[in-house]
Amino acid sequence: MVKILPILLLSIACVFAAPTPKTSVKLPLKAPQSRVAYHHARSRDHCRWSHLSNNSTNSTLNIPAINADVSYLITVGLGTPAQNVDLIFDTGSSDLWVQSANYDHTQSSSSKDLKETFSIQYGSGSTSGKEFSDQVTIGGFTFTQEFGVASQATGFNGIQGLVGFGPDDLSAITSNGENIPTPTDNLYTSGQISSDVIGVFFKSITDGGTQETNGEITFGGVDATKFTGSITYVPVTTVSPASQYWGIDVSSITYGTSKVSSTTHGIVDTGTTLILLSDSSVKALYKNIRGAALDNNSGLYTIPSSQVSKLNNITFTIGGTDFTLTPAQYLVPDNQVANQGGVSGTAYSWIGSLGSNESGLAFILGQKFLENYYSVYDTTNNRVGLAPLA
């Protein structure tokens, strides 16, 4: 049967006997071989979210991340023996699919053809193919899961597939309307991790290169060495459509002492590259910066060099705690501009517009925010946590 899904495809997991729990397993989040220019990342972010504006042990499992600067990828093994694939690590969806060129079911002794098809349509892209059930390996842990093998995919050049770690309700569109457990859910219910929680550490590229293995995902808890102070936890918002995702409430957004937005609702999402605000908030922000303008070539806002030294911090107040980005944190580093198709000597900002004023989705805190703050996605307690990076 054909299944039309709003963001990413459906993933059905059935967990069998669990291996002996491990105290900690760390692996890298890695990068695509090819670079993604600014305008491609901006377009991808907009396609990704356009439909919303239009309409028990003590063990943990740590997975390292390689920074592709616009995506973080996690290595996952599919089949027996495992065929390793690098999938976008995505908290904005709850499903797993892989390009057919990167997984051959005939080479896996545990593969099962489910005789069903899937079809995903979103923004200006789509993907479709057949559904299989097979063993999935993350770190040293293995479970059986249904996933899609895409014979057709547009908008994913150079990408092998995606694996989602959002709320499992995002996988509810199936033939019988069931909610599908995420890989984290399955690791937890099988006793392989101690909590239905993931902690995410991202860090920006600092040397002007194209990729680094400098991120980490912890399954089953948090890595206290990656953040300072305490974690600020806030409940998932009740305001739709942000409530369908890892959505949170922000009591204010300020630029220096100027208020950009009062109480608003949005999403924390590892699968979005930029920091995106509603149209009205973006206008209020850049009105404070003389000469700031949208660059049509890159899709990013540019700031005159004469104004860079005068820039102020931008602060998101979440759960009574201020999460501040300095100009150095929300501007593209000079040594990375040329690598991503920008003009050397031009100041670019990671903060852009969502393209709408949807009140229930007024911001997305993507990768460029999360490279400055440790984030926690707690399914058991239906909450999101943030803390300053160590």
Image (cartoon, grey):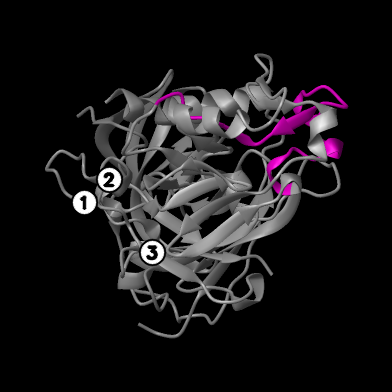
Q: Nearer the viewer, residue 70 or 300?
A: 300
Residue at the spot x=35%, y=82% of the render? 56
Q: Quadrant of the N terminus?
A: top left
Q: Are marks 2 and 1 in contact (CB under 8 Å)?
A: yes
Magenta residues span 329-356
Residue at mark 2: 171
Q: Does residue 81 lie above or below 112 as drawn?
A: below
The image position of residue 174, as x and y in percent, is 19, 40
Residue at mark 3: 234
Q: Does residue 280 lie above or below 190 as drawn?
A: above
Q: Which mark is residue 179?
A: 1
Q: Is residue 73 magenta?
A: no
What whole-number distance in Å separates the C-alpha atoms at marks 3 and 2? 23 Å
**Which numbered disc flags the more N-terminal residue, 1 or 3?**
1
Q: Does residue 270 lie above or below 377 as drawn?
A: above
**Which numbered disc flags the more N-terminal residue, 3 or 2?**
2
Q: Find numbered disc 1 in the image and state the secondary structure of the residue it sits on.
A: loop
**Which numbered disc flags the more N-terminal residue, 2 or 1?**
2
From where the camera sits, is residue 375 visible?
Answer: no
Q: Find numbered disc 2 in the image and state the secondary structure of the residue it sits on.
A: helix
Q: Amino acid at mark 3?
A: Val
The image position of residue 157, as x and y in percent, is 58, 25
What whole-number distance in Å separates the C-alpha atoms at marks 1 and 3? 24 Å
Q: Nearer the viewer, residue 4 or 290?
A: 290
